[in-house]
Each structure stands twice: as C-alpha cells, then as structure tokens.
Image: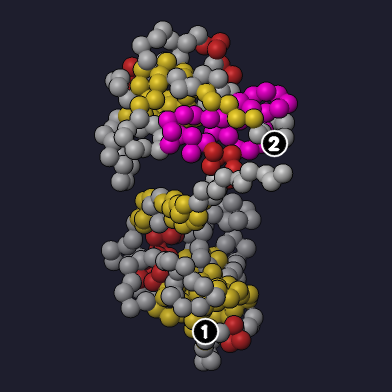
Amino acid sequence: MASAPSPEVLRAPLVVEFPFTRSLGPVQSAFLTGLRERTVLGVRTTDGRTLVPPVEYDPVTADEIRDLVQVSATGTVTTWAWNHEPRRGQPLDRPFAWVLVKLDGADTALLHALDAPGPEAVRTGMRVRVRWAAERTGAITDIACFEAYEGPGGGETAPHDGEFSDPVTGIVAQARLDYTYAPGRAQTAYIKALSEQRTVGERCPSCRKVYVPPRGACPTCGVATTDRVEVGPRGTVTTYCIVNIKAKNLDIEVPYVYAHIALDGADLALHARIAGIPYDQVRMGLRVEPVWTQGARFPDHYRPTGEPDADYDTYKEMV
C-alpha cells in the first residue's frame, strides 16, 4: 500500500539586518581617522608589543593603553584562504584571498582581502602592501585591499600623537545576514494552518506538553512530536514590553506593545503585537484573541476579548 506523499516543505529568502551607530574611543578614533589619511596606527602594550589593529586595553594585563605608533603599509601574509565566490558588500567583486597580514613594525596580524589572480598566486610569507581606496571616509574599507609587493619593507615604528583634523568619532556598523529559511515539516504545517486562520501545535508523546509554534521535537524530552493539536484561538498575555523606537519599514506608530501570549491549550507562549487597547493598559493575565486581515497568512495582532483577566496560577509556568 503506497504511503501518502509528504507535504511540501516551505522555503523563503530571509534577510536579518541591523545597522547600528557606535561611538569611538580615542584609540579607535585615531586608527580610523589615520586610515582616512593613509596612515596605519597601532598601539604599544606595556610589554612593548605593537598591536594592529589597536585596542584600548592590554589583552594580557588589562591595563589601559594609549601609546600610539605608526607602522608600515607593507607586510607579510601569515595565513590565507581563497574566496572563490564573493558576497554582497565584500571588499572585491571578483574572487580574492582573505589574508592575515602582519604589517612591518606590528606584532599582530590584520585581516583583509588580497587582490590576486588565483589561489596559485598566494602563499604564506608573501610580501604585500596596502592598496588605498580612492575615496576614504575613516573606515576599515579605506584599505581597499592588499596587493602583492616586491619592494623594500620598513620594520621601524614611529610614535604618533593620534591628532588629526576633523577626527572620526563614530561609525555606523552594517550587520546583515542573507539566507534561505526552510521551516521544516512541523513549522510548515503550522504556517499552512495559519493561512486557514487556525493555530496548530504538536504534543509530546512523553510529557504531553503542546508546543506552539512546533519544532518537530520536544525540547524537554528530546523525542519527536507528531500528534498535531489545534489550540486557541484565544489566549492570555503572560508578559510584554512597550516598544518606543520605530522600526525601519514597519508601518506601526509607537508606542505599541509586543507580548508573549499563551494560547488556550498550549504549553509554550508565542509572541505577537497587542492592539485595540491603550498601550499603558496592557497587563499580565489580559485575555486576548487574534485579528486577521483579508488574505493574511498570520494574525495581524491580538486584541482584548473582554473576559476577566486570567488567574496568575493558570499561566505562571509560561512567564
């Protein structure tokens, strides 16, 4: 007897992106401003080593260190790996080598890209030099990459006061991850049920807990969960937070509330937005229900049901 075909597992591209602004201390400020001025600075530790890139505290003694020195823009490859398929935002748009380069005068190595025609042209111990970017702003990308170099080196360091006109005092760090997400058998069934305005979890055959969203296995017992259980649609707010910072590309006015909601019949709280009530009236124990929009595959938000608040003992295990 032929078995029923397994449901198609969903797949979708997903981007996690979080650009954030950070301020720079005197050492990092001098290092990045120096790159803008085609100057590579390191910092000298209490035992006389020169660290490039510089740090503000000695990694051995934890002492604060401010003794800046200028090192050469030439150096030696200490190790490398070939990148045959560069990704968006990487230093070069063609295959290149990632290299650790110990600049002349430094005691540590700097990670960057090496422009080379192929892996056969790269070796540990090869001599390289900095190729400066045509336009420099005070960032590590002011070093466009390294390139092979056969000329003389300069191992001497020179003290530097770290003073530049118009110093860089802060940077915006772009953090982004692009990947394809496959939710698996359990979450595929959960997502498909949501498109029918139903919430389906899975019960552990051992401890009998119902997990929503399901993961395909019980995190407590470590056994597969295959018994599907419809829960909700109503639930209880177990805990919550008030959001006061507007997110990029999210058309929701602040402040608003995100909460953990224990759906009736579930043993794990999921998170969702609460609306239909002033943000400062949301509370633990509030009874809520989902609000769906036309054609949506998941609830837009949850709103109060008007029922009396749930007793704390009924949801305390999920706080």
Q: Is residue 259 above or below residue 82?
A: above
* Camera-nearest residue between 186 and 32: 186
> Which quadrant would the N terminus be assigned to in this image?
top right
Instruction: Name the side, left or right, on which 266 lies relative to 272.
Output: right
The 10 Å Cα crowd at callout 1, few under 14, some 14 to 19, many 20 or more, is some
User: Could you tell me which secondary element the residue under label 2 belongs to?
Assistant: loop
Question: Which residue is denoted by mark 1 in the rendering?
Answer: 116
Q: Is 264 situated left or right of 165 in this image?
A: right
According to the picture, the residue beneath numbered tag 2 turns out to be: 224
Q: Quadrant of the C terminus?
A: top right
**Res. 64 visible in picture:** no
Q: Quadrant of residue 173?
A: bottom left
- Which residue is drawn at the image coordinates 41% and 50% (left, top)? 18
Foreground residue among 285 and 267: 267
Q: Residue 19, labelled with which disc?
A: none
Q: Which residues are magenta?
A: 190-218
Report the Cα–Cα distance between label 1 and label 2.
Answer: 50 Å
Q: Is residue 68 magenta?
A: no
Q: Position of residue 180 (x, y in %)?
A: 50, 55
Indicate the position of residue 287 as horizontal and vertical percent values. 42, 15
